[in-house]
Image (cartoon, rainbow, N blue to C red):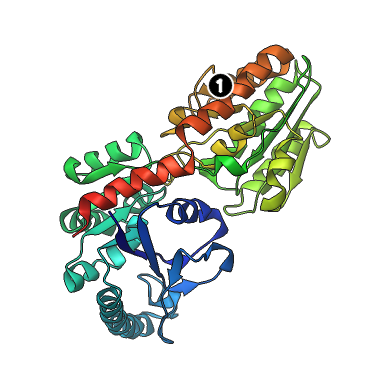
Amino acid sequence: MSVKSLQLFESYLPNAQNWAFRVLNNLPDTEIDVVAYRYYNEQFVTPKINLLPLPDYVNLNMLEGREGAKNIISRFFKRISNQQKNEQFFQYIAQLSSQQKSDLIHVHFANMGWQYLKLKQLTGLPYLVSFYGFDYESLPFQYPLWKRRYAQLYESADGFICEGPHGAQLLKDQGCNPDKIHVAHLGVETSKIPSVSRLKNPGELKLLQLANYSQKKGHIYSLLAFVKALKTCPDMSLTFVGNELENVKRKLEKIINENGVSDKVHFIPFVEFTKLYQFFGEYHVFIHPSCYADNRDCEGGAPIVLLDAQCTGMPVISTTHCDIPEEVIHNRTGLLTPEKDTDALAASIRTFYEMDNDTYQKFAAAAREHVISAYDIRACAEQLQKVYNHYKS
């Protein structure tokens, strides 16, 4: 069954959302047209993915809450202007969907699902919305207005897509009809990820965390646990790779200075994607203790980088946060602890520090096997394809 889909984004496509590109580009029986408020990143455009032309007036300032004016009166008139532009934009998209003979609309992130909701009425097409992270709980937690908007979205949209059972349960708890909820994993291109050989002797450990610096990624807990474990595990290092988002790095640097471990903890701002898997080979264990942030931001599902790391044969230290226990199998492909529990994290670090090479290689082989068998991008794309086939008009 061939499906013609219209994919809607805020922007197409930030590097950090490459997982969306991966699954769309591997859909077996779906043609893909994309519309967004901004296009950039040509690396995510392929013969399969068609960016539809945008009118000159379209820009990110048209989005809800981005009026950009400095005073109340100016914001009011700017909002009216943006509403008019959006009405025009939505009419334009509806015409495009008719010309392209679209079978369904798939919107990425719940806030954009609400932003584009008018298109459900204008087109009459099946309307699907994917949740990914901050949109599960953080948005309605910080801004109560979004609780009403979510209720409207749950009533109006035809289907919702989550990457795992945890996200699906969150939607049910918020009042979404369970019959509208579907799970489709996000995966990785396992055939393109090399198996990287590592030797792990007892009494040594090189830890790596690769994630932009935000509270939900748990960098603070990685560092605090590392400092605790150092007392009995001296031959260790911890490397952080990422960009600053929420002033987390400054807090890390303060802890490092207070504990005198600057020779043990290293910061790298960026690693080219083409060199990522080779870079992974320089480390023994990937650490990523995701947790709920103060504003209820969460992973929603689980970080895709955990799959990338494991597929190279690198075991993981992480937490039982959201759907991580599906991606990382405790005591087989890594070690999991309750979120924000630095004593338990330190114990996991010590376990890998003391681990002999034979035991380590069993973890490494199991990690790669798990990702290949459960998270290959082609199988994950098939899951999404089945959802599309269900809703094709």
| Spot occupied by residue 121 in the image (x, y as percentages of width and height) | 17, 70
| Spot occupied by residue 20 in the image (x, y as percentages of width and height) | 46, 54
Q: Quadrant of residue 195?
A: top right
Residue type of the residue flagged with mark 1: Leu
Left or right for 205, reference 295: right
Q: Is residue 288 above or below residue 8?
A: above
| Spot occupied by residue 156 in the image (x, y as percentages of width and height) | 17, 59
Residue 144 shows up from this direction: no
Left or right for 348, reference 159: right
Q: Quadrant of residue 367?
A: top right
Between 119 and 209, which is closer to the camera in this rendering? 119
Q: Residue furthest right?
A: 263
> Which residue is identified by label 1?
335
Left or right for 100, reference 229: left
Placement of the C terminus among the 4 image quadrants? bottom left
Left or right for 114, reference 228: left
Residue 135 shows up from this direction: yes
Q: Secondary structure at mark 1?
A: strand
Between 76 and 319, which is closer to the camera in this rendering? 319
Q: Which residue is located at x 48 percent, y 24 percent?
A: 338
Between 121 and 243, which is closer to the camera in this rendering? 121
Q: Quadrant of residue 179?
A: top left
Crowdedness of circle 1 by 10 Å Cα count: few (<14), some, many (20+)?
many
